[in-house]
Amino acid sequence: MKLNKLVHTVDAHAEGEPSRIVVGGVIDVPGETMFDKKMYLENYNDEFRKFLIHEPRGSTVLHADLVLPPTNSMADAGFIIMEATDYPPMSGSNTICTVTVLLETGMLPMVEPITEITLESPAGLINVEAHCKNGKCERVTFTNAPSFVTHLDEKITVPRLGEVKVDVAYGGAFFVFVDAESLGYKIIDEEAGELSQLGEEIKRAAASQLPIAHPENEDIHTISFTTFTAPPLVGGQGRNATIVSPGRVDRSACGTATSARLAILHAKNELGIEHEYVHESILNTNFVGEILEETEVGPYPGVITSISGRAWITGTHQLSVDPSDPFTTGITLPDLWERF
Ligand SMILES: O=C(O)[C@H]1NCC[C@@H]1O
């Protein structure tokens, strides 16, 4: 057997949302910070993301996280988040999967009952508290990058819907928020296809009509996700479906959307500091969010939030490329891609 590449991954899911954690096969990526390294991959080696996530080795419903040595001496490990179409600076489900894998494989030492570690994400340092018992990482709570709101009750025009009222907020990526009930949805399984299609249309409309940029990082300058919000169905405080490109529902409650939603609720005086907010997913799983303190991000008032959830390892893979394989970097047929 002759191989051009051999990459070791440990796969996991956080409350239903799957990630593939790269723990071997890559020594390092050029760049002085984790954000520089993410930009390097995006600009010069995007083939690696496609190799990990796209068919025939992955699927549209998969993310990958590349574990690297940190560039900041305060951090225990670094990681670069890769999703089906891009590289978000931060991600809740990816963080929870990465922490669970680092601790349950012994890559970082597990201390029971609470392991405290710091990860360096492209969005900055992330403090993590993991509740561990009998070698299992039972729950991961992390303090997210600062969240802030850029637009409240803004009207955009969406081709199939006409005028739609939206909020836009950052929670590690930019999200456009839409009230699902006002469009006739409750966020249940049978709506997943329609919500995915509408979400992609709303994201495109919002991105073109509401220009935005992160005040502290001009390379973060577009709306990446649509989040539909609805009243809870299974005892939480809120429910959501975040649409992940190329157009499918986040299986988890989406950690970064939860942080962004907390920033919006706080801006509307609907949620104070230190109140737990149980955010339900379409699968009835949840992430628990909490506003820890107020802050400022450039000209925007913001909040520091914590997000908490669980992950489970699903298996390990040795991904490889046979030099005679015609499909080394992924297949994206329009039956699943460019559908909407
Ligand atoms: O939990 C989150 O933040 C994420 N889940 C998939 C898409 C987002 O990055």
Image (cartoon, rainbow, N blue to C red):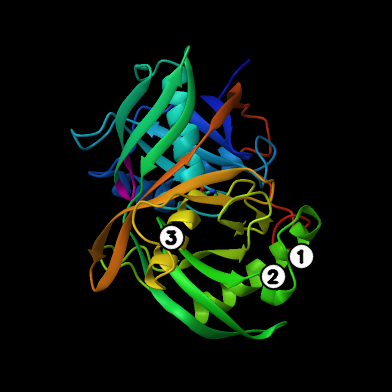
Please provide the residue range marked out in magenta.
120-124
Label 3 and label 1: CA atoms lie apart by: 26 Å
Residue topped by disc 1: 194
Location of residue 3 in the rendering, given as x and y in whole percent from the top left corner: 57, 22
Q: Which mark is residue 72?
A: none
Kindly identify the amino acid type of the residue bearing the numbered disc 3: Leu
Location of residue 19 in the rendering, given as x and y in whole percent from the top left corner: 56, 37
- State which tag comes first along the sequence, 3 or 2: 2
Which element type, helix, strand or loop, lies under badge 2? Answer: helix
In the image, residue 28 lies in the stretch drawn in magenta: no
Residue 6 seen from this side: no
Q: Nearer the viewer, mark 3 or mark 1?
A: 3
Q: Are marks 3 and 2 in contact (CB under 8 Å)?
A: no
Answer with left or right where residue 224 lies relative to residue 67. right
Tell me which residue sits at (44%, 39%) in the image.
95
Residue topped by disc 3: 262
Q: Nearer the viewer, mark 3 or mark 2?
A: 3
Tell me which residue sits at (66%, 47%) in the image.
60
Residue at the limit of the structure toward the left, as seen here = 73
Above or below 65: residue 337: below
Answer with left or right where residue 172 lies relative to residue 73. right
Relative depth, front residue between 18 and 300: 300
Tell me which residue sits at (68%, 76%) in the image.
182
In the image, residue 121 lies in the stretch drawn in magenta: yes
